[in-house]
Image (cartoon, coloured by chain):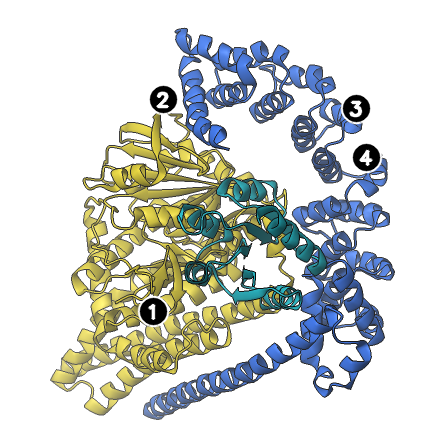
Chain colours: A cyan, B blue, C yellow
Amino acid sequence: MTTILVADDDPDILELVNYKLSQSGYAVIAVPDGKLALEQAREHHPDLMILDVAMPFHSGIDVTLDIRKDPDLKNTPIILLTAKSMEQDTERGFAAGATDYMTKPFSPRELLSRVQAVLGRTV
Amino acid sequence: MRLALVVSVLLLLVSILLMLLATIIFRFVRTKLEARSATYEAELRTMLVRFLSEDLSLSELRVLKKIHSSQFDEISEAMLTKVKGRAKDILVSFLYSRGAIDQAITRTRKFGYLGRCKAAMFLGNVGIPEARVPLESMLRDRRRDVRTIAVRCLGQLGKPESVPALLSAVDDDEHPVPFGTVLVALMRIGSSGKELMKAGLNSGGGQRRAAIAEILGMEGSTEDTPDLISLLENDPSFEVKVRSARALGRIGSPKAIPSLNKYLDSGQPTALRIVCCGALAAIGDRETVPEIISLLSDGNDQLARAAANAASQMGPTGIKYLNLAATSNSKGASFAKEALARLAAQAPRISQD
Amino acid sequence: MAPFIATLFRVLNWFGLSYFLALNTIYLILIILASFNLGSYFRRKTFSGFEDALSSPATLPVSVLMPAHNEEAGIVESARAVLSLDYPQLELIIVDDGSTDATYDKLREAFDLVEIPFEMPEMVPTLGQVISVNIARGLNDLTVIRKRSVGKKTDAVNVAINVAKYPLLCVVDADAVLDADALIKVTMPFVDDPQRVVATGGAIRPSNGCTAYRGRITEVRMPKKWLAKIQVIEYLRAFLLGRTGWSKLGALLIISGAFGVFRKDVVIAIGGYDLSSIGEDADLVARIHKYMRALKTPYRVTFVSEPVCWTEVPENLTILRRQRKRWSRGLVDTLWSNKSLFMNPKYGTLGLLAIPYFLFFEVLGPVVELTGFLLLLIALYFGFVNAYFAGLFLSVAILYGILLSILSLLIEEISYHRYDKWKFLCQAVVASIFENFGFRQMHAYWRLEGVFQALRGTNRSWEAMPRKGFATDQSGTNS
């Protein structure tokens, strides 16, 4: 089964994403901060990560940087999810190695199709 | 005298104890309430999410007793700002069916200002067209907070019809609103409100024109260049000139070059010269490089530095001229060297991407 | 003769007591004012629009200035933490002021620094010679300036001001730990009221005992040492509530050097930090007030109670004494060099309330407090007053002090409740009581020493405070 790790400090969004992806048949690991995201990623080697940019401890961008440095995880696709629609965040995100990018407010359906697209691209 | 002292000692003791008690009770109640609502919240959230994902119908949701609580209202209202598309439509129609929206429209006229704030926020988040008129009338509310929220919510609503009201709010000295908030609101309304915005150029104060210049720059459409050029050249307000120059740089149309060039002159204020210099660099026409490089020997160091950095962003021609300037023994050589070094420090990241 | 002396002692004692009551009542008023302000802050919190500010073109970019002297232990972490603050656009300028340790090498390694040729502008005066200007390769907007130290932190900050490229300046201590949203919250007043706001300050809290991870506080805890616990209460009362109160009166005089934001054009216009000043933080704010009043345009200097900057406070008496002596000396120095503000109606509440308060109560306070205490002892010894009376006198004074601390705790409980364990609350209550026995008297003595030093006029330089720092292991606990 395809495993997806979701990290967001907003419980509403975490639950929304978690539910939508679980319903679509993915195994979801949901965590509320960047530190846990890294720990869980190292333990479970997810097939995809969805990260909020502004999270406690590590921003989504920091986590992305760390994942890209980790030899076991460096090819994991990462979708960044953020409230900021500022251009430089997108730039920083992609420079850090993010695969795709979505801004909040978001549509759960759109997220699902992006997830499928990203996974289809890498498999 | 002695009695007075004794009484004050006792009074102080009693008030200390009372405060301690209040602190303890407050903490006790707060922790209890938080713990209770936390358990509830998770349950309610799951239900809401299932409803939004269309795994739970409205009639199924209604049967559940727990949703008839103010907490469920709070959670659904919070969710409004986080979703869009189909999920948001479902949520809005649900709130309609609960009467929450009509209630909020009535509440915009209520006495308590917090109530008015909440109502305005809610309407802005829901984003229904009916909210526009009550929100616009809130721009003249007697509380600054309410006015600020009304501005923000009109932005979220995104209706071009609210542009004139927002623009007059910028100029309204009796009912001031934060300039930055109006900018964000106008930015959110975006290009659909542009015609109305331009119509606002001919009336009102400098703040309004400054806002319009900023927004036109962010829209970045070349057809606005003539309007901005005329603002840069004719506007009496310095702030408007600066913002127009920056906007022209963002838009990047070469048509703006002659006017921007005019404001590089030493007779102009430094701040404006620096902005024009940056704008010319952003337009990036090779022909303007010599003009910019000539500023390196200007008496004002701030401008010279800005010019060197601008030139370093203008591709091979800029770099060629900077290299020349760096080897000369003119005063600008050190700024040219600095700009080249900065560019070199950025280079590895550009090639890595 | 004896009855005369007895009466004299009586009068002096009563004077002492009324002085004490006046001091505490002023504080009580400040705290009550602050609680109103906190109340409205909290009610408006949901509508404040921080999210908007993060993406607004009106949010001004900030140059964060961080002077550092022998900070090799934590400098890289501090720099990373600043660079990852939630803020749309910021640059970080670190001034390595003559460090003799590896401060610079650590930074060079971590951020891949490269030296650039740089012509130093002289917008504000500086003394120490600049050795090199270095920038980070890659995405981080970091500039590290190495300079020779002249023993003044203000000189380092002035150098950074000269290099700063953005319209707002935020001065942060190298050992300060900022909450991720602290910067955006402290700059919000500039976004909301860009015409008038010229300076803002944020709340400072002691970081001792807290756990940190990657330059952010993860769990707020009470410090282990009682000396630090007392300072937690002190910071709460004076820096959180006291300053909120002054800010509400429009008479904020001190913005802590550990965390404040200023408009660059104003700072440059007044010539930056005064290199000869000892109390540089208050001095800067006082001169900003003077400058703005002279311009005759409406302006605001605001304290924002929420943004939190955590800083390590001294845990031993020697260092605490040195710190407090310096503060007191700095205050005297500032009041002296800005004496034109005193009772000057042109300066509104600042000249008529804040400055006189600082003079009569903060500077002269320790003198009155200590002499009063001594007089009471003498009077008691010679039998001019009886023990019962003396006891009552002292009880009123001490209980009033405790009352203020407990009230501060209550307000903290209602508003921020950062110390959320019952154990911490108990410790805080005990500390507010203990503070009045020993610490208070000692503190008065140190402040007095500072006042004397100021009158004699001695030099000041970077004072070393050995940092324990945070344990930053993976589990994030601090032992």
Residue nearest the viewer, comparing B54 with B255: B54
> Secondary structure beneath disc 2?
loop
The residue that mark 2 highlights is C117
Circle 3 Cα neighbour tier, 10 Å, few/some/many (<14 / 14–19 / ≥20)? few
Mark 3 or mark 4, whichever is nearer to me = 3
Amino acid marked by disc 1:
Val
Q: Give the side of residue B170 with respect to residue C26, left or right.
A: right
Residue pictured at 40% horizontal, 16% vertical:
B334
Amino acid marked by disc 2:
Pro
The residue that mark 4 highlights is B201
The quadrant where residue B3 appears: bottom left
The reply to whether label 2 and label 4 mark residues of one chain is: no
Q: Is residue A120 visible?
A: yes
The residue that mark 1 highlights is C232
Mark 1 or mark 3, whichever is nearer to me = 3
Check if mark 1's residue and mark 3's residue have beta carbons within 8 Å. Answer: no
Check if mark 4's residue and mark 1's residue have beta carbons within 8 Å. Answer: no
Q: Give the side of residue C331 with respect to residue A119, left or right.
A: left
Circle 1 Cα neighbour tier, 10 Å, few/some/many (<14 / 14–19 / ≥20)? many
> Secondary structure beneath disc 3?
helix
Q: CA distance from mark 1 to mark 2?
A: 45 Å
Quadrant location of the C terminus of chain C in the rendered image: bottom left
Amino acid marked by disc 4:
Leu
Q: CA distance from mark 1 to mark 3?
A: 60 Å
Q: CA distance from mark 2 to mark 4?
A: 45 Å
The residue that mark 3 highlights is B226
Chain ID of residue with mark 4? B
First in residue order: circle 1 vs circle 2: 2
Amino acid marked by disc 3:
Pro
Q: CA distance from mark 4 to mark 1?
A: 54 Å
Vertical relation: C164 (above or below) A80 = above
